[in-house]
Image: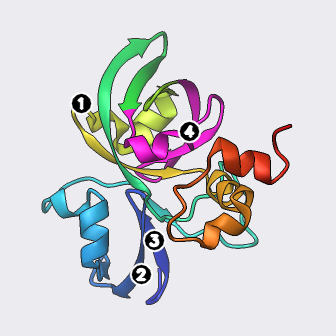
């Protein structure tokens, strides 16, 4: 690590401003505290850490920016053969971006969605992921940082066409799809 490097901290991209001993310091904005779980951390809390991807790096998951879209909640967890099945609930406004067999980032861990039921979605966490992340500490009610697939966000914006620039537009609708040639 070097000053100015980005480090993903439980899904939140932070910039290293000091390197005391074996840790690091980063500034965190009020915006970040309001829209992530970082403000609820205490001294000694465990977090997931990951260095920023470089162009030379192997991409082992989906594209993750460290720009948290919202905070979700663990609804349930249970053992499932050698792995664990987690059910999480996303904020309603993020649910449309979560797809069966799509990608989701939970506290900085890139995962595949097994099933979707409205705003709730299922994940299957293998032993390696349980051992190397903070998933083993989650309980029903645990709050987690969620980052949806970046391609889904940009696709929605592109499909909105000219209405994307209209502050009064309500987002993607059947009318917008029809006007832009996506429906007959």
Tell me the residue at 32%/55% (across/down): 47
Task: Tell me which numbered mark, 2 or 1, is placed earlier along the sequence.
Answer: 2
Do the residues bearing badges 2 and 1 touch, measured as CB atoms within 8 Å?
Answer: no
Do the residues bearing badges 3 and 4 touch, measured as CB atoms within 8 Å?
Answer: no
Residue 178: percent from the left, percent from the top?
77, 45
Tell me the residue at 31%/70% (across/down): 32
Task: Tell me which numbered mark, 4 or 2, is placed earlier along the sequence.
Answer: 2
Asked if 12 appears above or below 120 in the picture, the reply is: below
Q: CA distance from mark 4 to mark 2?
A: 28 Å
In what element is the residue under mark 2? Answer: strand
Task: Tell me which numbered mark, 1 or 4, is placed earlier along the sequence.
Answer: 4
Q: Residues within 10 Å of mark 3 (few under 14, many from 20)?
A: many
Q: Which mark is residue 126?
A: none
Asked if 35 appears above or below 3 in the picture, the reply is: above
Residue 80: percent from the left, percent from the top?
45, 12
User: Which residue corresponds to mark 4?
Assistant: 98
Q: CA distance from mark 1 to mark 3?
A: 26 Å
Q: Which residues are magenta?
A: 89-116
Tell me the residue at 28%/78% (across/down): 28
User: Which residue corresponds to mark 1?
Assistant: 139
In what element is the residue under mark 4? Answer: loop
Residue 110: percent from the left, percent from the top?
55, 46
């Amino acid at each position: 690590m070097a000053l100015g490097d980005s480090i993903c901290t439980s899904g939140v991209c932070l910039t290293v401003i000091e390197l005391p001993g074996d840790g690091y310091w980063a500034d965190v904005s009020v915006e970040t505290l309001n829209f992530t779980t970082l403000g609820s951390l205490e001294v000694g809390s465990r977090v997931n850490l990951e260095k920023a991807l470089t162009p030379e790096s192997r991409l082992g998951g989906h594209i993750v920016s460290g720009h948290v879209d919202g905070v979700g909640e663990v609804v349930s967890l249970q053992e499932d053969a050698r792995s664990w099945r987690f059910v999480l609930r996303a904020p309603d406004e993020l649910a449309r971006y979560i797809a069966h067999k799509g990608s989701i980032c939970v506290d900085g861990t890139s995962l595949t969605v097994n099933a979707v039921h409205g705003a709730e979605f299922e994940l299957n966490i293998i032993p390696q992921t349980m051992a190397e992340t903070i998933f083993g500490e989650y309980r029903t009610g645990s709050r987690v940082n969620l980052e949806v697939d970046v391609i889904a966000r940009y696709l929605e914006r592109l499909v909105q066409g000219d209405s994307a620039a209209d502050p009064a537009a309500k987002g993607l609708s059947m009318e917008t799809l029809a006007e832009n040639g996506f429906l007959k």
